[in-house]
């Protein structure tokens, strides 16, 4: 296995791209784009991370085994996010409980009258 | 070459095998680091989803100038670290030492800017608790709790990075590395780039929620 050397020109190019993306994400944050603000910030951070991993950390030039090891931590993180959000994002969907009840510190007691078999709490 | 051959530990057949093992080991460690920070990123996601307005309001009180300067500093330090590894691969020892020292310098700059920022944050009473800045939604304290925890843990990693790179620089100054053996430079480079990646995420999450 011959060690691959990333050329200095490429490293400088990646650095310039990273600074350009920093400027872009800062600039876009100054504009009111609604939900697109968060989407843009997320996408740009993802691109920056991939540039650092692939070129500065040489993963692009490494064998598949290194790719698997490099991806593992992020995949496990996404599993954690997925399992956690599958709880939080679906709590309002449980029959008998108000929407997003956990937001109001009321979990698990219902705070308003609800249809269905669950006995309603007394009205005020 | 006699000096170089002794750098292969006895459990490895040759240097490339040792290098690959070290790279995999470092990525395994970095996976644990991803999950170490991941717990806090998870809390951030859950609470920002729950209290989007409070988070947007709280984020306005971060000092975006310091945050942006620090992002540029860390990105540049990643470049100098990558150039240090490049110099090590080509056996340019003097360039290696210079780039390592420049990287350490940028890391210290980051910590100084962070310190100035912390000082101003504390002056603004943005430390969660009884004396938290009045006039903000109560859940803004959750944002600021995460701010201190995440940037604090990141700053700790930067500090450790300064220590690690100082040892590598000392080794470089004593001509411990060659194009045949530069594993420690490569490995500590991976660590340093990881610290940069954490900040790449912290910057938009903490500073850029609501700037318009």
Image: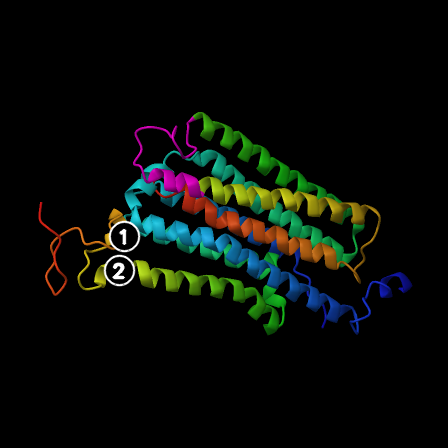
For disc 1, the marked residue is A102
For disc 2, the marked residue is A91
In the image, the segment drawn in magenta is B124-146
Given contact means CB atoms under 8 Å apart, are the residues at marks 2 and 1 in contact? yes
Q: Is residue B126 magenta?
A: yes
Residue depicted at x 47% and y 39%: B148
Residue A58 at least partly seen: no
Left or right of B77: which side holds B4?
Answer: right
- Residue B86 position, x and y percent, is 70, 55
Above-or-below relation of A99 to B147: below
Residue B31, located in which quarter of the rendered image?
bottom right
Pick out the residue farthest to the top: B123
On the same chain, marks 2 and 1? The answer is yes
- Residue A116 position, x and y percent, is 11, 64
Left or right of B120: which side holds B54?
Answer: left
Pick the front one: B2 or B91: B2
Mark 2 vs 1, N-terminal side: 2
- Magenta span: helix, strand or loop, mainly? loop
Quarter of the image where the C terminus of chain A is located: top left
The colouring scheme, among rainbow, by chain, secondary structure or one colour, is rainbow
- Residue B174 position, x and y percent, is 84, 48
């Amino acid at each position: 296995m011959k060690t691959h050397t990333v050329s200095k020109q490429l490293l400088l190019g990646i650095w310039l791209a990273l600074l350009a993306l920093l400027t872009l994400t800062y600039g876009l944050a100054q504009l009111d784009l609604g939900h697109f603000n968060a989407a843009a910030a997320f996408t740009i951070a993802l691109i920056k991370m991939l540039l650092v991993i692939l070129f500065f950390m040489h993963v692009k030039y490494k064998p598949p085994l290194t790719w698997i090891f490099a991806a593992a931590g992020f995949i496990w993180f996404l599993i954690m996010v997925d399992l956690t959000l599958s709880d939080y994002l679906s709590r309002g969907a449980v029959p008998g409980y108000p929407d997003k009840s956990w937001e109001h510190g009321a979990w698990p007691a219902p705070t308003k009258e609800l249809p269905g078999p669950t006995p309603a709490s007394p009205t005020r | 070459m006699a000096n170089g051959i002794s750098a292969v530990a006895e459990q490895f057949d040759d240097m490339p095998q040792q290098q690959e093992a070290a790279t995999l080991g470092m990525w395994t460690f970095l996976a644990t680091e991803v999950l170490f920070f991941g717990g806090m990123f998870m809390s951030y996601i859950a609470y920002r989803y729950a209290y989007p307005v409070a988070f947007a309001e709280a984020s306005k009180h971060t000092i975006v100038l310091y945050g942006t300067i620090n992002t540029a500093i860390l990105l540049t330090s990643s470049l100098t670290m990558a150039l240090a590894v490049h110099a090590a691969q080509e056996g340019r020892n003097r360039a290696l030492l210079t780039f390592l020292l420049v990287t350490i310098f940028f890391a210290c700059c980051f910590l100084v800017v962070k310190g100035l920022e912390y000082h101003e944050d504390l002056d603004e009473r943005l430390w969660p608790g009884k004396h938290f800045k009045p006039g903000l939604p109560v859940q803004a304290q959750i944002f600021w709790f995460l701010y201190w925890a995440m940037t604090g843990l990141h700053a700790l990693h930067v500090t450790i990075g300064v220590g690690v790179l100082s040892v590598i620089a000392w080794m470089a100054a004593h001509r411990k590395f060659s194009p045949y053996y530069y594993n420690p430079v490569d490995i500590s480079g991976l660590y340093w780039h990881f610290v940069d990646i954490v900040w790449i995420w912290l910057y938009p999450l903490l500073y850029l929620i609501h700037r318009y």
